[in-house]
Amino acid sequence: MTVLPYRLVTANRVHAEVLAVLHSDCFDEAWGVNSFATALETPGTSGFLAVREDGAEPIGFVLFRIGGGEAEILSIATHPTARGQGVARTLLNKSLMVLSEQDAKVLFLEVGADNLGAIALYKTFGFRETGRRKAYYRRGDGTRMDALVMALDMPGAAPKTVSE
């Protein structure tokens, strides 16, 4: 597989339609344009879009928010044709840098229990499972999948105890 170079662009409201299309290419339950526009206008919410250098084709994104020292990855995705090229790792690294600068103490995310590639990636960053949401995601075939709630204690933060 040839890895094409890409760059990160700060996501804002003008990217809402592109984000919605990319989200629908990656997930069964896609967010609409209005969901992205509203999220990007919400204080404390930021994100990045990964675009190919050869024509600026969008290949991935991350959207996150911070408040009160806690942060959450709202959504992170890599287009199926760009998986395995480090896009999600790059997006997550950039998010961690930004959130660390904003004094986030802990970062949360949710991931489908069947998304083994993403779970493995998150574990390489030090995320740990802190809970489970039963039948949280609806798949295209109508079945339901649990979501794992994962947390990462940010560098410089005291370890946080999470009760189940």
Image (spheres, helix red, strand yellow):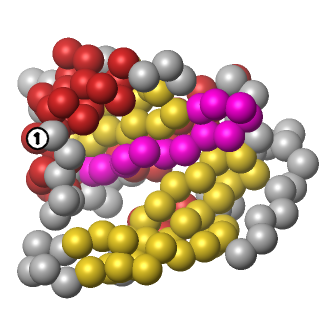
Residue toward you, 8 or 1: 8
Q: Residue at x 16, y 63 (%)?
A: 28
Q: Is 156 displayed left or right of 35 in the figure?
A: right
Residue 48 in the figure: left or right of residue 81: right
Residue flagged by tag 1: what amino acid is it?
Val
Relative to 31, is 43 above or below? above
Q: 33 and 47: which one is in front?
A: 33
**Magenta-drawn stretch, dominant element (helix, strand or loop):** strand
Within-10-Å neighbours for mark 1: few <14, some 14–19, many 20+: some
Residue 98 can be seen in this image: yes
* Position in image of residue 19 (x %, y %): 20, 35
| x then y, percent, for residue 101 | 70, 23
Q: Which residue is mark 1?
A: 21
Front-lying residue, 34 or 108: 34
Is residue 76 found inside the magenta-colored segment of the image?
A: yes
Query: Would you say 89 lies left or right of 34 here?
Result: right
* Total count of labels: 1
* Residue displayed at 49% across by 45% down: 73
Residue positioned 12% across, 53% down in the render: 25
From this viewpoint, which residue is outermost toward the right? 158
Over which residues does the magenta segment extend? 66-78
Q: Is residue 17 above or below residue 73?
A: above
- The quadrant holding residue 116 is bottom left
| Residue 99 within the magenta-colored segment of the rendering | no
Kind of element beneath mark 1:
helix
Q: Is residue 26 left or right of residue 145?
A: left
Does residue 33 sit above or below 42 in this rendering? below
**Which x, y percent locates residue 27?**
20, 59
